[in-house]
């Protein structure tokens, strides 16, 4: 018995300002192509069932092109796999925040998919001896909380759920996707044949028979964190999972990436003048195998003083930005020099990010918002604004 596990397609995701010849956002086209390639792989593998573990769309109100693409690809799956069940749940991105907002998931019912978009639903397929308990994002906030337990006589008991498992990020939330439901150890303790997880964008085994399939493209707030975690896990790019439910083994199925993401080796500008730093950056860019044309590129440079940033060769930087789909020159200022505190003890002034973090920690937050994530997101937004300001100075 084989199950195809996909997650987080994020159809309709848009980023940057580059358009195709037909006027569509290039990153939206990339994300659609990644989904098509995943569907190609699933059709070739011919599994007994398919699950999509949330965030099919990037927004509650997806673009018309995203809706059309989803319908077309699911029609392809439906025709190719015959009566193999296809189960889709809603994630946090495609769940309406208001009960009076109509979900686009109603359309998926009409094309023969088994959909759970608001409440948990248990789908049984006696001819396959299979039960799939589909738990969308919204169901995890019901009172009382839904009991995540197998039920029925079926041999294969599968849980499909969208959320963040305990200890997933540790102290480093740089690659976290905000807004997910928090799952506890008790939530995942039941004896499932397999748990198909969505929300975390890096393919990851939580424990035996429990996996995140990962996203199909880089569409989180921090793709660079994803790249780092994939390197650490020795993963090459994105993909989906083909799961042998009898053996409890998940086999990775990679897809050809629609676009290259390049995080160039970080540079240190300490004690360098602008011409010297210009040469270092130029060397890093020209040494990229196959060049940077059409790629999404980041170059981080530490210890860049404001006068040095202003004196860089911004004409050349603009040329790189035109060549790449997106070129991010991430110039980071030196640590503030130490100074004496009022007591005479060595100290240093609090940086703006530290001041902001202190302020945000004291804020009273609405229920369901995690304080740590709230503070982190505020600091990230401040850093993005500062980077844009440095770029504008050129």
Image: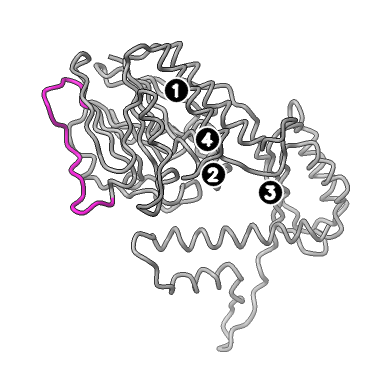
Give the side of residue 113 with respect to residue 382, left or right: left
In the rendered image, the quadrant that contains the N terminus is: top left
Dot label at residue 300: 3
The answer to which of marks 3 and 1 sits earlier in the sequence is 1
User: Which residue occupies the foreground of this view, 133 or 312?
Assistant: 133
Q: Secondary structure at mark 4?
A: loop
Badge nearest the viewer, 2 or 1: 1
Q: Dot 3: within a 10 Å radius of its alpha carbon, few (fewer than 14), some, or many (20 or more) residues?
A: some
What span is colored magenta in the figure?
A: 141-157
Horizontal and vertical percent for residue 316? 86, 45
SS class of the residue under badge 2?
helix
Q: Tell me, yes or no, whether the highlighted magenta stretch contains residue 151.
A: yes
- Apparent side of residue 160 relative to residue 280 in the rendered image (left or right): left
Label 1: which secondary element: helix
Q: Residue at horizontal 57%, vertical 58%?
A: 380
Q: Which callout, 1 or 4, points to the residue nearer the camera? A: 1
Q: Main secondary structure of the magenta part?
A: loop
The residue carrying mark 2 is 225
Residue in the image at 83% along x and 60% along y = 310
In this view, the mark in front (3 or 1): 1
Mark 4 vs mark 2: in front: 4
Q: Residue at x 51, y 33 (%)?
A: 67
Q: Quadrant of the C terminus?
A: bottom right
Q: Do tag 3 and tag 2 residues touch (Cβ < 8 Å)?
A: no
Look at mark 1 in the image and give the residue it sits on.
74
Which residue position holds label 4? 11
Residue 148: x, y in percent? 20, 40
Query: Is residue 286 one of those drawn in magenta?
Result: no
| Location of residue 321 in the rendering, given as x and y in whole percent from the top left corner | 78, 42
Residue 188 bears which disc, if any? none
| Quarter location, residue 168 | top left
Q: Is residue 227 visible?
A: no
């Amino acid at each position: 018995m084989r199950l195809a596990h996909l997650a987080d397609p994020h159809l309709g995701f848009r980023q940057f300002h580059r358009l195709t010849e037909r006027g569509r956002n290039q990153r939206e086209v990339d994300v659609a192509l990644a989904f098509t390639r995943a569907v190609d792989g699933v059709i070739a593998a011919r599994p007994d069932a398919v699950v999509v573990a949330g965030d099919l769309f990037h927004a509650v109100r997806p673009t018309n092109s995203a809706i059309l693409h989803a319908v077309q690809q699911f029609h392809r799956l439906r025709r190719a796999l015959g009566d193999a069940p296809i189960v889709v749940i809603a994630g946090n991105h495609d769940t309406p925040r208001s009960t009076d907002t109509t979900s686009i998931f109603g359309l998926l019912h009409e094309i023969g998919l088994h959909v759970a978009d608001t409440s948990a639903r248990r789908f049984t397929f006696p001819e396959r001896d299979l039960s799939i308990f589909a738990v969308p994002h919204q169901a995890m906030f019901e009172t009382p909380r839904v009991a995540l337990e197998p039920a029925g006589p079926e041999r294969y008991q599968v849980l499909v759920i969208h959320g963040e498992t305990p200890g997933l990020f540790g102290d480093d939330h740089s690659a976290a996707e905000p807004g997910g439901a928090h799952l506890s150890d008790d939530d995942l303790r039941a004896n499932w044949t397999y748990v198909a997880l969505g929300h975390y964008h890096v393919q990851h085994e939580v424990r035996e028979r429990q996996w995140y399939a990962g996203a199909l493209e880089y569409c989180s707030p921090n793709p660079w964190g994803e790249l780092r975690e994939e390197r650490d896990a020795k993963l090459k790019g994105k993909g989906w999972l083909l799961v042998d439910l009898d053996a409890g083994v998940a086999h990775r199925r990679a897809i050809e990436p629609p676009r290259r993401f390049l995080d160039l080796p970080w540079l240190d500008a300490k004690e360098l003048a602008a011409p010297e730093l210009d040469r270092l950056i130029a060397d890093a860019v020209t040494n990229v195998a196959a060049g940077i044309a059409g790629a999404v590129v980041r170059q981080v440079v530490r210890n860049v003083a404001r006068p040095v940033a202003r004196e860089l060769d911004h004409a050349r930087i603009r040329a790189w930005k035109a060549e790449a789909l997106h070129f991010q020159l991430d110039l980071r200022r030196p640590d503030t020099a130490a100074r004496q505190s009022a007591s005479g003890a060595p100290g240093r002034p609090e940086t703006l990010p530290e001041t902001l973090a202190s302020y945000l920690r004291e804020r009273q937050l609405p229920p369901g918002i995690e304080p740590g994530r709230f503070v982190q997101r505020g600091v990230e937004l401040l850093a993005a604004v500062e980077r844009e300001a440095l770029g504008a100075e050129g």
